[in-house]
Structures are given as structure tokens and as C-alpha cells.
Image (cartoon, rainbow, N blue to C red):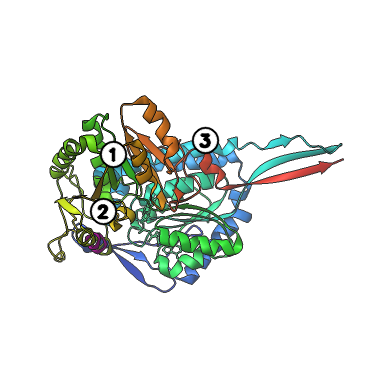
Amino acid sequence: MAKYEMLIGGEWVAPVSGNYIESINPYNQEPWAQIPRAGLEDVEAAVRAAYEAYTSGPWSNMTPTQRGALLRRLGDLIAENVEELAKIETRDNGKLYAEMSAQVRYMPEWFYYFGGLADKLEGMVHPTDKADMFNYSRYEPYGVVAAITAWNSPLLLAAYKLAPALAAGNTVVLKPSEHASCSSLQFARLVEQAGFPPGVINVITGYGSEIGDDLTGHPLVSKISFTGSEATGRRIHEIAGWDFKSTTLELGGKSPNIVFADADLDQAANGVIAGILAASGQTCVAGSRLLVDEAVYDEFLERVLAIAKGAKLGDPMSPETNVGPVATREQYDKVNGYLETALSEGAECILGGPSDGPPEPGQGLFIRPTIFTNVSNDMRIAREEIFGPVLAVIRFRDEEEAIRIANDTRYGLAAGIWSRDIRRCMELPAKLQAGTVWVNTYRVVSYMTPFGGYKASGSGKENGMEAIKQYLQLKSVWLST
Ligand code: NAD
């Protein structure tokens, strides 16, 4: 069984306690690797190493151009190791190898894009009303960034954070999820190979419930960038609030996919299914509420059902598979709990439904694609993030009602609109309370365009020019003669 070590201050280290966590493959529930179970001392060592690298190591004297070159080198190394990294991710979280390899293949772009931005962070000279005085502003890094990621796309989420944080000149302590840490530890080997000075990127692993507060509350951590659940986001926000630390929080969602009668229904049906079945519904932007115009309700549902019925469950490594297992036993039980709740609330299950019994040892943690109709927006399956292949279908009468239902949620991560009416496609994005709106497409992201939630889906932006500003503070300098 593979046994990983952590990268702290340029050294490969075992946890001080000597304890490890078994990483379980959700396709067969077998442990396949061991990851360090870090404790307080390990957090302390990682943060100190990052702080030293920020304040006195070679990183602190590098020019932005040199930093950019290191980032681009790391991008090249990722590109050379796509297969290995993606296989590890699939083993850890059960997501399809096809999807994980596409993500990892795309990942170098973050390091190229932000590497290119490193030497373009221009300050400004400001006009003033004071005679004989001069004022300019300059961007400065925060110092040590704690980057904490979820298990569903460990490496891509790490790229969202590390590339802009490093381009801005910060140093980083990365803590991936205890459920899927191996790819981040493997990635750390590339960090070493790329030639980053010791301590610039540190990777520690362990239970968030044990070391999360120690990391985010550490006085030498100045910025926290987090992707994960709303509950953990709230905890981090609370802790950060005590020291007024800057945070970027990417949390959950309950995103509406709105299909109007004038949409290309085949295109919309494919988009809706991809939006909910990709990654077995375990994506923050899952289009988990399907809002359908009553004028095409039956016709559209038929198309959705036909595609969903054809989805093949199976080995996530196989190119034939459309839906893999969910990532953890906890997730499996949680999703099944929601399926029972939906039935007891009066929703009608037209596909899938609760699993027949707990999975036998050695079996995959499979949840069948499930579609509920007769859903009203006040039911729990329409209000809470399920994080599984579960679609709640709600019908609407007109545009106004569609917008009202779409916005009637605590979340605001994303929304989809399917329509051929150009007026609607132009007007509706402004009316939807969501950080990303997709029109006649769904789930597209890019390193070049901002991404982040409204309302309880978080704060701050990742990707694009906005992202680098999350890792910079602006200093105003006055000069007098
Ligand atoms: P989680 O909140 O349980 O864990 C996320 C990370 O936080 C893990 O690394 C965990 O170890 C760590 N953690 C736990 N307690 C902590 C604490 N007190 N302090 C600091 N860190 C702590 O979330 P999860 O189950 O891993 O991920 C699923 C959630 O992530 C879903 O809600 C999903 O919507 C969200 N997500 C959001 C985005 C986005 O970009 N908005 C992307 C992917 C996933």
C-alpha cells in the first residue's frame, strides 16, 4: 500500500505523532494508501516554514519574473504527469478517470496564466490635493496563505488557489481533504522538482476537525482560501474574523437549471443531465434544481429521463462508465437519507431512488441517478445541498415565477438558462442571484474568467484577473520633499 509523507520546509516528513489515515477507494471500499495524520506540531512546522520562506528565504528576493518562471515550470511538470495524478484522484474520490484526467490536463493553464501575471502587477500614481506631495500605491502579498480544499476536485481546486497566491508572492500551506489527499502529496513532488525554494509550498494532511482551527487560527497565517462546505466555511469565517484575516470562501450550492419552452430541448436535456450526473452530482455547481416551463414539461422530462436511463454505472477507470461511485460512505449515507426524505415529503420518484441496502464490503458506493418530480421549492431536496446524482424537478408558469423560484434559495453559486429568445438570454442573467450564470451551456469554467458565489455560496472570486487581487493587499505611500 502506498504510504505518503508531507512536504514541510522542503523536507519529506512523517507526522510527529506517527499516525496515518487510510485512504479508501470508493469503487471497492478498500484502503489503497496511507496519508499522514498531522497534528498541531506539524501545522506549526508548516506555517513556520512558510513564514520563513516568505520573510527571509530566496523566494523573498526573487523578481516577479523569476517567480513566474517557476510557476510555468510547475505547469510543464503537471502536464508531463497527467495520467499518474488523475489515476490517483480517481482512486481517492471515485470520480471518472475521463473527468479527472481532463481536469489535470487543464490544470497547467492556471500556472501559465498566473505565472504570466506575476510581473504585471502594476501600482498607480494617485493625484492628490496636497502641494509638494506625491502618493503612489503598490500591491503587496499577504504572507502565508492557508489553502484548504474539498475532496471532489483536489488538484484543480489547489491550482485555483496556489497559482494566483504564488504569482502574487505569497507562500502557501496546502491542506487537502482527508478523503482525497494523495494527489496533492504526489503534486508536492513536482513542486520539489520544479525548484521552488523550501517552504514556499508546504503540503500537510489530516482531519480538518483536528487541525483545521490550528491552521486557520495560526497568527502567522494572513490569508485563508477555502473550498468546501458551508458549515466549515462558517467556522473559518468566524475564526478569521477574530484577527480580521482576509478570506476567500468557495462553498456549496443549490443551483437552478431553468428550461424555457423556446429552448432547444435536446441541447437543454443534455446540459441538464451533464449538470447533475457529472461527478455523480458531487460538484458545487451541480444543477440540482430543474425548473421546467409547464408548456413543455412532459415532453422535456421524457427527453431527460431517456438520457438518464442510459447512464451506465461502473468502474470509474473505464471509458464506458458514465456514473461512478460517490466518494465516501458518509456521502453515500447522506444522499440515501435525502432520497428517503424526498419520498416522505411527497415527491414522486420517476427514476432511481434509495439504495436497496448498505453496500457489501468490496462493493462500490453507487447511488443510482435519481429524478424526483412533484417537487415544491420548500421541500428539503429543493433547499439543501445533497451532493449526489439527484435531480429535483419543479414546474413554472412564466418567466417571473421561474426567477422567483430560482432565487428562493440561501445559495447563489450558479444558474443555467436554456432559451432561444435573445431578449431573455440578455435580461435574465442580471435578475438571477448567482455568481455564475450559464446561458445555453452549463458547468464551463476557465482560468481566465471569474468564479465564485453569491449569498451563502461564499465570498471572493477565483480565476481570472480578480483572483490575483484576492492574494494582494494595496499599500498607499505618501512622499514629501
Ligand atoms: P468540508 O467542509 O467537509 O471539507 C473541506 C476541507 O475543509 C477539507 O480539507 C477539510 O479537512 C477541511 N476542514 C474541515 N474542518 C475544518 C476546520 N475547522 N478548519 C479548516 N479546515 C477544515 O467539505 P467537503 O465535504 O470536503 O466538500 C464538499 C463541499 O465543498 C460541498 O459543500 C461543495 O459544494 C463544496 N465545494 C465548493 C466548491 C466551490 O468552488 N464553490 C468547489 C468544490 C466543492
Percent x, y of residue 371: 19, 49
Percent x, y of residue 187: 39, 51
Whether residue 204 is visible to the viewer of this picture, yes or no, is no
Classed neighbour count for the residue bearing mark 2: other residues with Cα under 10 Å, few (<14), some (14–19), many (≥20)? many
Q: Amino acid at mark 1?
A: Arg
Label 2 SS = loop
Label 3 SS = helix
Residue that label 1 marks: 397
CA gap between label 2 and label 1 equals 28 Å
Residue that label 3 marks: 116
The tally of labels here is 3
Q: Earlier in the sequence, mark 2 or mark 3?
A: 3
Callout in the foreground (3, 1) = 1
The quadrant in which residue 7 appears is bottom left
Percent x, y of residue 157: 40, 49
Percent x, y of residue 43: 49, 66
Q: Quadrant of the N terminus?
A: bottom left
Residue 206 horizontal side relative to residue 114, left or right: left
CA gap between label 3 and label 1 equals 49 Å
Callout in the foreground (2, 1) = 1
Callout in the foreground (2, 3) = 2
Range shown magenta: 333-338
Question: What is the magenta segment's predominant secondary structure?
Answer: helix
Residue that label 2 marks: 388
Q: Amino acid at mark 2?
A: Gly
